[in-house]
Amino acid sequence: MKHIKYFLFFSTFILFCISTAHLQAQSSSIPQNLSTINVNDLTDAQIRQYMSQASAAGLSDAQLMQQAQSRGMPEDQIQLLQKRV
């Protein structure tokens, strides 16, 4: 019985580590520094990808825009992004 508990704990821990690494890999595809980004240079597919990643992370559109601002995206680029969403 003790071995089963250890096995279940270990299995759960491994799954947690894998899922955490997967989420970090997804979020890392959005650059940390957005101060030099030009929204007009982004394709529609790229914007859809970023929006789906934000949605999968549980972020609303407003939260995504706040995060973009906190990562240095200029206000004019945020407004362009909002128009394209």
Image (cartoon, rainbow, N blue to C red):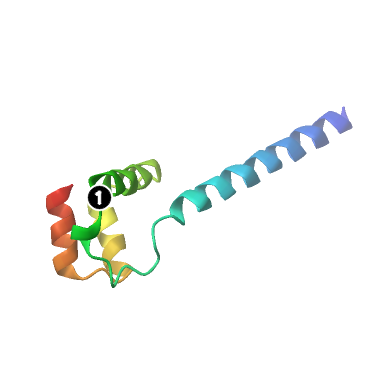
Quadrant that contains the N terminus: top right
* Above/below status of 55 relative to 66: above
- Of 5 and 27, the residue lying toward us: 27
What residue is shown at x 83% (from left), y 29% (from top)? 4
Q: Position of residue 37 (x, y in %)?
A: 27, 66
For mark 1, what is the residue?
43
- Of 10 and 46, the residue lying toward us: 46
Q: Is residue 14 shown left or right of residue 29?
A: right
- Of 36 and 22, the residue lying toward us: 36
* Above/below status of 25 relative to 77: above
The residue tagged with tag 1: helix, strand or loop? loop
What residue is shown at x 28% (from left), y 54% (from top)? 63
Q: Is residue 40 shown left or right of residue 60?
A: left
Tally of numbered tags: 1
Amino acid beneath label 1: Thr
What residue is shown at x 25% (from left), y 55% (from top)? 42
Q: Position of residue 58 (x, y in %)?
A: 37, 44
Q: Position of residue 13 (x, y in %)?
A: 69, 43
Q: Position of residue 39 (x, y in %)?
A: 21, 60
Q: Is residue 79 shown left or right of residue 69?
A: left
How many residues crowd mark 1 within 10 Å: few (<14), some (14–19), many (20+)? Answer: few
